Amino acid sequence: MRRVLCAEYSCLGIRILICRPNDCYDPLDPSGNITVTFDIHDWRSDGYAARVTIQNFYQYRHVDKPGWNIGWSWTNEEIIWSMFSACATKQGECSPVKYGGAHSCMPNPVIVDLMPDAPPVNMSENCCRGGLISARAIDPLRSLSSFEMTVVNLDGNSTVYPPANLTLLAPGPGYTCGPVVETTPTVSSDFGGRRQVQVYKTWKSTCTYSTFLANKTPGCCVSLSTFYNPRVTACPDCSCGCRDADQSTVSCVSEVDSLPLSDVEKADIVQCTAHMCPVRVHWHVKNNYMDHWRVKMTISNYNYKKNYSDWNVLVQHPGFKQNSTTFSFNSTLLPTAGFADEVALFWGLQAYNNELLQADQRQLGSVSTEILFEKDSGMFTLRNGWALPRRIYFGGEECAMPLPDTFPVLPNGSSCTKPPRYLFLLLLTYMTFKSLASWL
């Protein structure tokens, strides 16, 4: 895998990544990529049979609806005679050749996954989930997808060449794939691990994701509040774009709008807000105890047309260095590169809150949890926004954070930490002696 060099600069909590156009390295997920593997496991007189595997090595970025879409260009006029567990979107013109019944004669085929209700005869392992692929840290068993294809029209040519110009939509733009190159043949186990089976030839391509290629604006924002300050720090204005100046255009729907949502043709229509984001993550510092402190995190969906299935939230905060308990979400810590702060990944409980429902004109769709942190007396403080998150991602995309000078602050004269324990002991001793003196 190619190592990609990127420069990261931080100013007022805003991260700027400068990368080469073809790749982007994420220090919060240093080994993240999607690898596409072609394994030729059988030869035939005019071609070969291959298994194609799409493996997601991103810890927190998954492939959501409508699923992955992969394409390439043939270099030697190859034809896909048959395909199993996936399908080409176009058959193309096959009449001029002897393979009239071929699955696809396109010089640049585009392949999509089958749906879960596909006939069982067309299904195999790791297929037929509508193109959905889980993040590796959340469900490694569902972090890959695969299909079989038989490639012909090589006329007994013993030299085969990998496809070129690999493209991956997962589901939209943002992924850039490197060249398909030959690597060490894949080896798998058979007979319960007693036998090693090697394919004839293996080609691989590594695809990396760039937010800057995928989105012109963020897709989420963060708001903040605390128990010690009544002020709520809202998402920055126009975090995800601004409402159209031309009020006759429908870019959002107000809560009081009478326009039926069924009449809105736009795929994604959000509630009109100052931030105009489809998703908001709210971080509320709720309580400060003797040995612990508590946060409530709420994720709200402002989108009237979209549910977020298998959502996840990534939070960077130094408090995760200590033990923490999450009450309504799944959670795990992720390894990072070059960061002193810990990074925690949260996602919903299956069949309970793993789907963030769309908003309606009465209320927002939302899910929430409380997080109980243990205190480190040498590190914990409520001053200078320490209890607030450094960075939050939703669905793999970084959310727009408020500027630090807008964070809730402690009232004047407030203490940033709990009083030392010896003060309580001195006070207790004083009160005891005072009571004894008055009794005598």
Image (cartoon, helix red, strand yellow):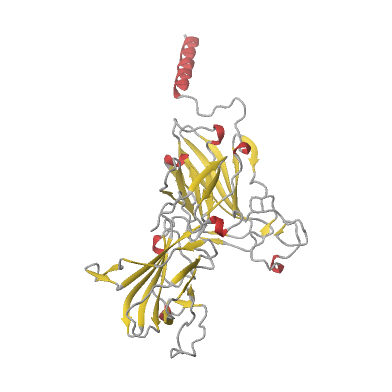
Query: Which sits in the foreground, 43 or 277?
Result: 43
Q: Nearer the viewer, residue 369 or 243?
A: 243
Does 311 appear above or below 440? below
Nearer the observer, 186 or 189:
186
Residue drawn at (49%, 25%) of the image: 419
Task: Judge left or right: residue 269 versus residue 120.
Answer: right
What residue lies at 36% left-to-right and 82% top-to-bottom? Answer: 47
Task: Using residue 287 as the reference point, say whether residue 364 is left or right of it.
Answer: right
**Who's the residue at 51% across and 29% down the image?**
417
Residue placed farthest to the left in the image? 194
Residue 56 shows in this picture? yes
Q: Position of residue 342 (x, y in %)?
A: 44, 43
Q: Residue at x 28, y 67 (%)?
A: 187
Q: How many marks?
A: 0
Q: Is residue 263 left or right of residue 213?
A: right
Is 307 situated above or below 375?
A: below
Give the image location of residue 310, x and y in percent: 50, 60
- Quadrant (top left, top right, bottom left, bottom right) of the N terminus: bottom left
Residue 389 in view here: no
Residue 133, percent across and down? 46, 64
Location of residue 87 with respect to 249 vertically, above or below: below
Determine whether 355 is above or below 76 in the image.
Answer: above
* 2, 130: nearer the viewer: 2
Image location of residue 151, percent across then percent down? 39, 80
